[in-house]
Image (tube, rainbow, N blue to C red):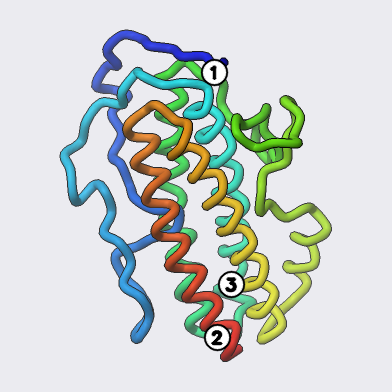
Amino acid sequence: MRARFVGGVIAAATAAVLTAGCSGSSTAPAGGPTASPPVSSQSAVAPISSEHNEADMMFAQGMIPHHTQAIAMSSQASERAASQEVKDLAARIEQAQGPEIEQMNQMLAAWGAPQSQPGSTAMPGMPGMPGMPMGGMPMPGMMDEAQMQQLAAQSGPAFDRMFLQMMVEHHNGAIQMAQTEQAQGLNPQAKQLAGAIVADQQQEISEMQALLSRV
């Protein structure tokens, strides 16, 4: 049975601006899809709800290092990518995910939940994912150290292709994690963020698949 924790009213200091999408942004390359507007432009700043359960905690604890790795991958594109479209996509991913990491850290702080460990590629366990043990559960879509080193060794069109292939896999993993939160989470802000991640990353997967046909 999933644990359910209902705390008191969270102080205004823990208020977070909800920023939509794992990698959405207000701008997109010419001819590309239009990204969803950030949640912060759609609603006023509100305190993080104290209502949460285990799925909410696992979502935030897992998505933080997942975002961190996407930023590490994307930050290489400005110097290594050949395609301006790839550079622009990577910049949007990098710019969007930093605020989302902060948002999820604020959620964990508001709930009194443990923070994610830097460099983690596994999480304590996520409900609803059969066949995976509780404790040290791999996160879907995460690259291992060898893959990250391989990407760092590429440049030009070879970097473009490898980056896009890896990021499609990475996005698919994030969507899987976000869909679990949508189905099993309790906190309204966490579920809203998960829904935005699903929508934005599905859109970006389509964009990256189109880019793969051109690079």
Describe the element under mark 2 as helix, strand or loop. loop
Which of the marked residues, 3 or 1, is nearer the chain's N terminus?
Answer: 1
Mark sitting on residue 2: 1
Q: How busy is the neighbourhood of tag 1: few (under 14 within 10 Å), some, or many (20 plus)?
A: few
Side (left or right) of 99 relative to 140: left
Mark closer to the chain start, 2 or 1? 1
* Depth check, front residue: 87 or 136: 136
Amino acid type shown at disc 1: Arg
Q: Are marks 3 and 1 in contact (CB under 8 Å)?
A: no
Residue at mark 2 to residue at mark 3: CA–CA distance: 9 Å
Q: Residue at x 40, y 60 (%)?
A: 200
Q: Position of residue 117 (x, y in %)?
A: 65, 31
- Tag 2: residue type? Ser
Front disc: 3 or 1: 1
Kindly give the residue lying farthest to the right in the view shown: 146
- The residue lying at 56 percent from left, 30 percent from top is 58
Give the residue type that dot 3 points to.
Ala
Residue 35: image location, x then y, percent: 33, 66
Residue at label 3? 77
Quadrant assignment, res 81: bottom right
Query: In this rendering, is residue 141 above or below 74?
Result: above
Residue at 44% of width from left, 30% of height from top? Answer: 185
Q: Residues within 10 Å of mark 2 (few under 14, many from 20)?
A: some
Crowd around label 3: few <14 · some 14–19 · many ≥20 (10 Å): many
For image coordinates 73% across by 41% down, the residue present is 138
Decide which of tag 2 and tag 3 comes sooner along the chain. 3
Q: Which percent across, then down, holds residue 7?
A: 36, 10
Q: CA distance from mark 2 to mark 1?
A: 46 Å
Q: Read off the residue under disc 2.
A: 83
Taking 209 as reference, is 125 above or below it?
above
Cα distance between the residues tagged 3 and 1: 41 Å
Side of 7 relative to 184 (left or right): left
